[in-house]
Image (cartoon, helix red, strand yellow):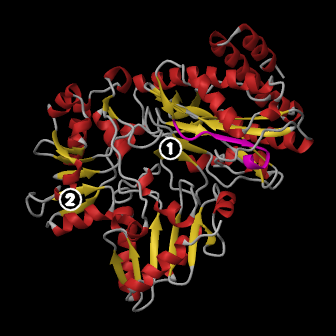
Amino acid sequence: MKNFKIAKIQQKLKDKEIDSLIINRTDEFLNEYIPPDAERLYWATNFSGSAGRAIICQNTSNLFVDGRYTFQAKEQIDENAISLLHWNDFSSELSKHFDKNKCVALDPMLHSIEEVNKIVELAKEKETKLYFTSPNLIDELWEDKPERKYSIIFNHPIKYAGIDASIKVDQLVNELKNNNLDSCFLSSLDSIAWLLNIRADDILHTPLAFSYLFISAESKPVLYLSIEKLNTDLKNRLSNFLILKPIEEIVHVFKNLTKNIKIGFDYKNTSYFFYHLALNNNLIPANLQNPCLIPKATKNEIELEGSRNAHLRDGGSITKFLYWLKNHHSIEEENEISVANKLLSFREPNELFHSVSFDTISAIGKNAALPHYRADKNNPVSLKNNSIYLSDSGGQYYDGTTDITRTIILGKPNKEQIDRFTRVLKGHINLSTHIFPKGTKGTDIDHLARESLQEINCDYDHGTGHGIGSFLSVHEAPQRISKKSMFPSVELLPGMILSNEPGYYKEGEYGIRIENIIVVVEEKENQLKFENISWAPIDRDLIDSSMLNEKELNWINDYHQRVFEKLSIFLTLEEKNWLQNVTKPL
């Protein structure tokens, strides 16, 4: 697709005497999932993935994506207008643009404090002019830019949240005092939603409300949000321990504070704009890891039980879907969109269902080789026999967030597909059954999921596991399982929920991923293990049982027995008979 927007941006840079412009794919809350009005990278480059950034110069342009999106980006961008580079090359490439008397521009709303502070130092060192754009340069060119929309904000009751919001706020204030801070500023939407037990639909598929929270150790916290979207009961509940202000007043958040008070910001996850605003108001910023991060990640017993129940109901829907696919008499009449819609029809009737948790990845054949593939609704690809089909989907339930991937063969697989699928399964089992000492990080055990693939010099270019929220984000920080070179990691703690999703992708042919959700639980003194909470059959037609050792064979047989026992109550007699057959011991 020909890209004419890059040329318009480059002309804007020339007019403003800017040499390089950094475009970050995020919003002012530094979200992964963002509203349509924040999709500036997509507008500029046509790349629609959830992670990416670009450097646009007067005569050249580069887009940076990670391994999940390499194939997708190649298909979406105009390579005559913009070059594609790996995410890991961004820092080294950016430094090339910092020369004496050059001008580099960025929007301080869309970059973290930590990132911009490094850029400021680099600019000083190289004697490069740093230009903070206001308004955003893309917004000046984006003629049909969508308007920001606010949804109804609703209560997330104790029966799902487990802990009263006022108690959580008191605990946070104590954390401030322990860190010798007067106050802190929160802009992380999932943290605010978790802390205050509120939810909304301002972000598609993620139940969050656009909001900011200023917390003082000496006075009532101040919550900035769309007040008119609160019902009377919720407004009264929040007003008992908060001051409510319109979100439009956020630029005045530090205006009347006492000079030189210390205010905590999470430098990794807060927009530089607010750090700069604090300095301009004679406040003293301090780096404070988001105090909600670990308490939110380590779910309480009510949250854990809710997640287990949500995954159980969700597993019933996945199993109905797999039965429908496997027994379809004319599968080639279906396409990637129609089968995704069919899955939704199985999921929607579930108790406590709110929405899907992300756009379903529904991919046949070569499309399954794109880890974050999006089917084209205007030109859907038909399913075909003797092909791999991959479905990665999830649901938002009031008691939990789900995410599950199943890869199946429609017809007959070839030997290579069976081999690769079995190796992915071996990695999945290897991680799922691992017992590890307290203090272990996700990066310490990621290799377990890759061992069988690496025996034949294969691998996958994405992390093995991401955190999962409690009726919150399907990608929750900070817990994750990945290579040390990919992302920073933290100690795995009891109550953390993560995905276990090794994969294999053969470009242009097929892709395989097996994903279950796991919970970190106590095993014995100083030992932890994973509890599996996802339930749906794993395609026996793609498993070579001769490649499994005794431990792996016992795992898959035990897992399938439990799938049958747990999910039968959700199924019709025909579905139940089919499930019994596809979960019989290998």
Q: Farthest residue to the top: give it.
A: 573
Q: Nearer the viewer, mark 2 or mark 1?
A: 2
Q: Quadrant of the C terminus?
A: top right
Which image quarter: residue 195?
top left
Which image quarter: residue 68?
bottom right
Residue 304 shown left or right of residue 539 in the figure: left
Q: Which residue is mark 1?
A: 475
Residue 554 shown left or right of residue 485 in the figure: right
Residue 107 shown left or right of residue 391 in the figure: left
Badge 1 element: loop
Residue count near mark 2 (Cα–Cα under 10 Å), binned few <14, some 14–19, many ≥20: few
Q: Amino acid at mark 2?
A: Val
- Residue that appears at 61% across and 36% down: 393
Task: Pick the residue in front: 244 or 289.
Answer: 244
Q: Residue 403: horizontal and vertical position, in percent?
A: 57, 35
Q: Which residues are magenta?
A: 357-368
- Measured in 3D between alpha carbons, the distance from the residue under mark 2 to the one under mark 1, in whole angstroms, is 29 Å
Which image quarter: residue 269?
bottom left
Q: Which residue is mark 2?
A: 251
Q: Amino acid at mark 1?
A: His
- Residue that appears at 73% across and 12% down: 576
Task: Pick the residue in front: 93 or 155.
Answer: 155
Task: Pick the residue in front: 352 or 524.
Answer: 352
- Residue that appears at 28% across and 35% down: 196
Q: Residue 318: horizontal and vertical position, in percent?
A: 65, 26
Residue count near mark 1 (Cα–Cα under 10 Å), binned few <14, some 14–19, many ≥20: many
Task: Pick the residue in front: 78 or 491.
Answer: 78
Q: For residue 358: magenta?
A: yes
Q: Residue 237: horizontal and vertical position, in percent?
A: 19, 28
Q: For residue 257: magenta?
A: no
